[in-house]
Image (tube, rainbow, N blue to C red):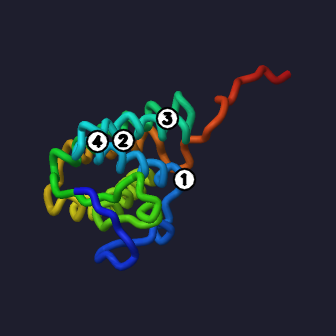
Amino acid sequence: MKLNVSPNTAGVIAVEQLGFDPFEAGVLAITRHFMTGFDAPHLQAWQTGFAVAVERWGQDIGLNAAYAVMKLVQALRRARYDFEYNDPLCTNARVWVTADEARLMRMLHHMRRDQTNDARDTLDKLTKGRMDPQVIRAGLTLAARFGAGVPRRGPRPAFRVVK
């Protein structure tokens, strides 16, 4: 369910208060495009989600990251159809997160840092008590592929022979 939020909307949190790293902030933006794509397929917002990921992290990392985020969003949509998210194109909404978005991003934040208990608690709230194995698997796959501190844009480091 797409929302246009403001600081006066109940349950809304400022993005800056959550302490997301740049990768997590990017995942949030891409998630919103994918959610929009499911709610309004005629908009084909999934294409924008992939394009944003490539712009943000380059083609190699961006396409892989977007695919992993898509798998997480698909699993979450199967577990919960009432997920509330912000419109990805609303400039006012970019600085705010819904309670559902905050839970999803906190879960991912904890998974990427191998903070199992915190991730489990957040997942429980996100899925309303249903510890959905597909959401867990997709979240852990994304977290394992893009752990804290990853990714960086630019050329890959090259190995050199040092004498």
Judging by the rendered image, the residue that carries numbered circle 1 is 22
Q: Name the residue at the front extreme.
A: 42
Q: Which mark is residue 35?
A: none
Residue 85 vs residue 16: left or right?
left
Amino acid, disc 4: Gly
Residue at disc 3, secondary structure = helix
Mark 4 surroundings: few (<14), some (14-19) or many (≥20) residues within 10 A: some
Judging by the rendered image, the residue that carries numbered circle 2 is 69
Residue at point 17%, 49% (across, down): 132
Front label number (4 vs 3): 4
Amino acid, disc 1: Pro
Q: Give the Cα distance between marks 3 and 2.
A: 10 Å
Q: Which comes before the other along the chain, label 1 or label 4?
A: 1
| Along the viewing direction, whichever of 162 and 126 lies nearer the viewer | 126
Front label number (1 vs 4): 4
Amino acid, disc 3: Gly
